[in-house]
Image (cartoon, rainbow, N blue to C red):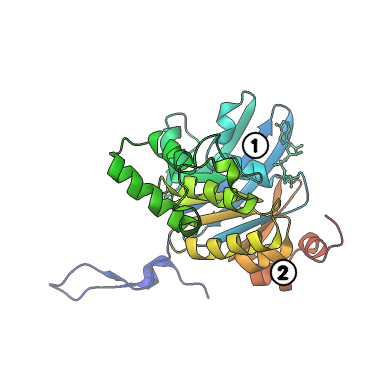
Amino acid sequence: MSITAPELIRPAPPGTQPATLLLAPKPPKIAIHNLGFRYGDTVALKGVTFDLPENQVIGLIGPSGCGKSTLLRVLNRLYDMYPGQVASGGVLLDGADILGAEVDLRRLRARVGMVFQEATTLPMSIRGNIAFGIRLHESLSRVEMNRRVERALTRAALWSEVKDRLSEDAAELSGGQQQRLCIARALAVNPEVLLLDEPTSALDPHSMAMIEQLIDTLKQSVTIVLVTHNHAQAARCADQVAFLYLGEMVECGAATQIFSAPREPRTQRYVTGRFG
Ligand SMILES: Nc1ncnc2c1ncn2[C@@H]1O[C@H](COP(=O)(O)OP(=O)(O)OP(=O)(O)O)[C@@H](O)[C@H]1O
């Protein structure tokens, strides 16, 4: 028998505080309901519905072209910059709609940061790369800026490697360091959600391991959505996994369940490598 909300509430004795919630279910960080997306006439997502719990890593998996990157681009309205790209349905961030016309996109993109497959460092110093993102949102004194830069690089596990070379060109860094710099740039504006689109697919195994470790640490403070083609990575990093196929959400659940006991035959065929 399922427990309904009122059964979780213990009535308060007369003359005391109101009812105590014994086991209030935590609301999701992001709730997606019946999401559709079109690139002009091309339908990329249809009827996608699922919840993204707070402070977890949600892995998005599925064959090429199934809509994983599109779903990420909806979560921070990146598509909004391109005419003819249209989302429908509902996406709630902390219960508030993010698809509405009145949403402050600059603020949304600070709350929902994004890191891409290829490290997108800017042609400027290491420090400048972090400061650039912050200046888009805030005006800080030099001391405050230095503090923020250090904190962002520390959170991205890069500070100890670059603290003596902050004025050097970011292009001098290795590929793995550049990707961590991009993560630091996103973290510098204190996002609540971090979207990672195949962040390690261009990296060597050592750099990949560092970023996976970083993901594990960061989820204590940020909700992470990770697109990956690497099933082993999804199994290692993700708490929840969502399997998309031809723009539809086929199945989502705990990573252990999706990889060991998928309910849907299509998920089973995909995770066992029979298509993809
Ligand atoms: N700019 C675009 N214009 C038109 N169609 C697009 C555009 N970008 C993506 N699509 C189409 O939308 C669908 C979903 O693409 P998307 O990139 O989201 O898939 P994906 O699962 O991330 O793929 P991959 O794993 O190869 O990166 C595909 O059919 C793709 O061809």
Q: Quadrant of ligand 1?
A: top right
Relative to 123, does residue 84 appear above or below in the rendering? above
- Which residue is drawn at the image coordinates 34% and 46% (left, top)? 146
* Amino acid type indicated by mark 1: Phe
Residue 254 appears in view: no
- x and y percent of residue 220 in the render? 45, 64
Q: Which mark is residue 37?
A: 1
Q: Give the camera-side residue of 218 and 265.
A: 218
Please tell me which of labels 2 and 1 falls first in the chain.
Answer: 1
**Would residue 27 appear left or right of 252 to someone viewing this image?**
left
Ligand 1 lies under 8 Å from the Cβ of mark 2: no
SS state under label 1: strand
Is disc 2 surrounded by few (<14), some (14 to 19) or many (20+) residues within 10 Å? some
- Residue of label 2: 259
- Which residue is drawn at the image coordinates 51% and 35% (left, top)? 124
SS state under label 2: helix
Most distant residue in the left direction: 15
Q: Give the camera-side residue of 169 and 181.
A: 169
- x and y percent of residue 132 in the render? 44, 36
- x and y percent of residue 234 in the render? 67, 63
- Which residue is drawn at the image coordinates 34% and 43% (left, top)? 145
